Image: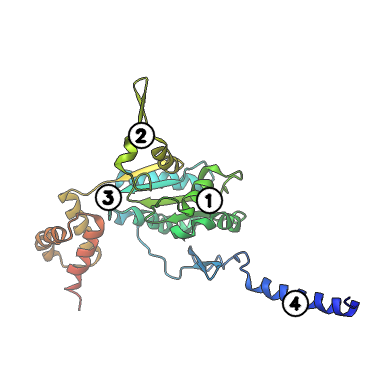
Amino acid sequence: MSKPSDLSALLERAHAVLEKLEQLLPGPAEAPDWKASTAFRWRRRNGRAELIPIEKPHRIRLSDLKDIDDQKSRIDRNTRQFLAGKRANNALLTGARGTGKSSLVKALLTAYAKKGLRLIEVDKTDLVDLPEIVELIQDRPERFIIFCDDLSFEEGEAAYKALKSVLDGSVSAMSDNLLIYATSNRRHLMPEYMAENLQARHVDGEVHPGEAVEEKISLSERFGLWISFYPFSQEEYLSVVEHWLKVFGAPKNSLDRARAEALQWALMRGSRSGRVAWQFARDHAGRFEE
């Protein structure tokens, strides 16, 4: 039979072990220095999460984004409503690659940071932490956009259900100072297969998708605002090239010659887009820098 002194010593050792274990276990993320930046990145390492200020956010102006005026107008109006404390929607920006989806979200931060807009970039794999992020910012006076770039999911990913829950399905309401803006090349954020279309059924002349398709649509439908982007025509592409050549200070007498080179550049890349135009303009203007 153990003596009382032996039992007391055993309890003390157990308590010391528990204290060490608590130190090793990841605790809740601490609030960052909110004045350090207007943009932050959520990062989880070795089980510990933190909100890291981005020292030099990518500053691009709304006026730099050409030939997407309708898309700019819709997302800008939604964001201004949000900043004014009015009702606004989570937004899903989908469509052709390189047409300005991500740049448009970054340009909103440049335009409205002084009015209290803040951006939090979250990788797809970290979307399971959304409830923790919401709790961290819910009492802040700023207005936050959680930015998920190039979003897509495969079957069974935990992040898919986490995002779906935060957007609409959770028991607790999303904070009033938070919106989610996501970009994707896929409208429904998940791969679609021909076999799934065979599950469609016809009822009274209406087509009803199968359960697999319904599940995929259910996530994208939780974004109240859908904004689509399309490939550029040749003239739209050349217009963007000319804009960036002027921004980068290319000589005026090189602009006409640049048109033919810009078309060859797009042909080699297999795409006419704002991104390709920007990349060509950087290359072309760089030849004239001393």
Task: Confirm or deny contact between disc 2 and disc 3 (CB under 8 A).
Answer: no
Task: Confirm or deny contact between disc 3 and disc 1 (CB under 8 A).
Answer: no
The earlier-in-sequence mark between 4 and 3 is 4
Please give the label number shown on residue 199: 2
* Residue 274 picture location, percent across and down: 25, 56
Of circles 1 and 2, the one toward us is 2
| Of the pair 216 and 148, the residue shown nearer to us | 216
The earlier-in-sequence mark between 2 and 3 is 3
The earlier-in-sequence mark between 1 and 4 is 4
Query: Three-letter amino acid code at disc 1?
Result: Leu
Residue 56 vertical position relative to residue 76 in the rendered view, above or below: below
Query: Three-letter amino acid code at disc 2?
Result: Gln
Query: Three-letter amino acid code at disc 3?
Result: Ala
* Residue 178 picture location, percent across and down: 53, 51
Residue pictured at 21% horizontal, 49% vertical:
232
* Residue 1 picture location, percent across and down: 89, 75
Disc 2 and disc 4: Cα gap in Å?
Answer: 59 Å
Q: Is residue 228 left or right of residue 236?
A: right
The residue wearing badge 3 is 96
Please give the label number shown on residue 178: 1
Q: Secondary structure at mark 3?
A: loop
Task: Confirm or deny contact between disc 2 and disc 4 (CB under 8 A).
Answer: no
Location of residue 210 by image quarter: top left
Disc 1 and disc 4: Cα gap in Å?
Answer: 41 Å
The earlier-in-sequence mark between 1 and 2 is 1
Location of residue 256 by image quarter: bottom left
Of circles 1 and 4, the one toward us is 4
Disc 3 and disc 1: Cα gap in Å?
Answer: 27 Å
Residue pictured at 32% horizontal, 50% vertical:
185
Residue pictured at 16% horizontal, 50% vertical:
235
The residue wearing badge 4 is 16
